[in-house]
Image (cartoon, rainbow, N blue to C red):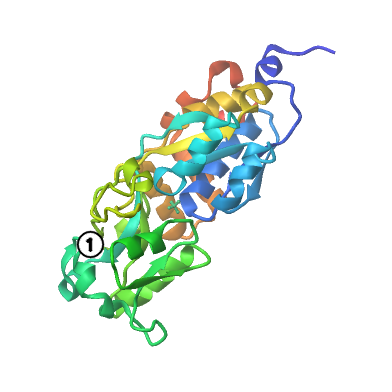
Amino acid sequence: MSVSMSEFAIGSSNERIKIVINDWTSQIVMSNIAAIFFQEMGYKASFVQLTTDAQWSMISRGHIHLQLEVWEGTMATQYQKLMDNNRIIDLGNHNAKTREDWWYPDYVEEQCPGLPDWKALLGCSELFTNEKSNGKGIYLGGPWEKPDAKRIRVLGLNFNVERVSHGDQLWIELEQAYNKRKPIVLFNWTPNWIEYKYKGKFVEFPEYSTKCETDPSWGINPEATYDCGNPKNGWLKKIAWIKFPNKWPCAYQVANKMNFTNELIAELVYWVDGQYLTHLQAAQQWIKTKKHIWQQWIPPECKRDSMSIYDE
Ligand code: TMO
């Protein structure tokens, strides 16, 4: 049996690379882009759809192998735990800076003067109530784990969290409210495409610090943690199962180099959520139009002559 140089570099593993996909657009499109690269290099790749809550034990045990979007604001704690236990490796940060927090469309500022300062919400929770909310304002949260209920409690806000079961539901509710100029405060993040379509702002809670999560005496409530907002300028990282580099060396190198900016992410999200391309179509369009970017991600020894994505 003869093994060519390129097969040697690519690695002999026939095992399928399992890429986790979650339930927001940029993560899914980025995963499709990676899968196309891997397949072009001769690997087998497939997707496993999981919630971010469920993904940690799966990647820890090697049942899934790659996650291309770990957001500081929602996932830093779990990430750190698996790093400390040597279950995953860090494949580096994207250039993109992230923020995930309470957000409202601009007209809400006229209805609740003082925003974006969170203290304004102390005085106008009744704007956000409905028939079923027992006089409590509603904060519409995403299906991702956040300490919102705790934050509401320790900051003395008269709000309850209502969670949507799928992220897209947030934009449906936003659009309905927006068209009627109805007060709404909901979970949003950046980079995302929402900023293209709607004007709005994040609520400015007390500045985040890691101490806010661990030290009750820190912050404006001296008896409680979580009396702060989520990180601004948060990181966005890629991680892999600890054995990933040995099993799929070329895939490892590419994943390690993959690097998206805020602008690149917002654009590819817009293709799907604003222009209704499928995730796969958006990934293909991205590869077709951004060759000058991804070309540098593929090490020469990992290229195959027959790679169709290199053909003009
Ligand atoms: C993790 N997310 C981008 C949905 O906040």
The furthest residue to the right: 1
At horizontal 23% and vertical 56% (from top left) the residue drawn is: 204
Image location of residue 132, percent across then percent down: 42, 85
The furthest residue to the bottom: 131
The N terminus lies in which quarter of the figure? top right
Determine whether, in the image, residue 295 is placed left or right of residue 40: left
At horizontal 60% and vertical 32% (from top left) the residue drawn is: 87
For the residue pair 297 and 211, the one nearer the viewer reads as 211
* Quadrant of residue 241 within the rendered picture: top right
Instruction: Evaluate whether residue 51 shows in this view.
Output: yes
Determine whether, in the image, residue 135 is placed left or right of residue 280: left
Image location of residue 153, percent across then percent down: 35, 65
State how many labels appear. 1
- Compared to residue 255, the image places residue 172 above or below, namely below
Instruction: Evaluate whether residue 304 shows in this view.
Output: no
Image location of residue 298, percent across then percent down: 52, 24
Residue picked out by circle 1: 118
Q: Residues within 10 Å of mark 1 (few under 14, many from 20)?
A: some
Instruction: Tell me if the residue at label 1 has its CB under 8 Å from ligand 1.
Output: no
Q: Circle 1 — which element?
A: loop
Image location of residue 78, percent across then percent down: 51, 42
For the residue pair 172 and 53, the one nearer the viewer reads as 53
For the residue pair 258 and 1, the one nearer the viewer reads as 258
Determine whether, in the image, residue 70 is placed left or right of residue 178: right
At horizontal 60% and vertical 28% (from top left) the residue drawn is: 251
* Quadrant of residue 139 within the rendered picture: bottom left
- Compared to residue 64, the image places residue 280 above or below, namely below
- Compared to residue 47, the image places residue 200 above or below, namely below
- Compared to residue 157, the image places residue 222 above or below, namely above
Report the amino acid beneath label 1.
Trp
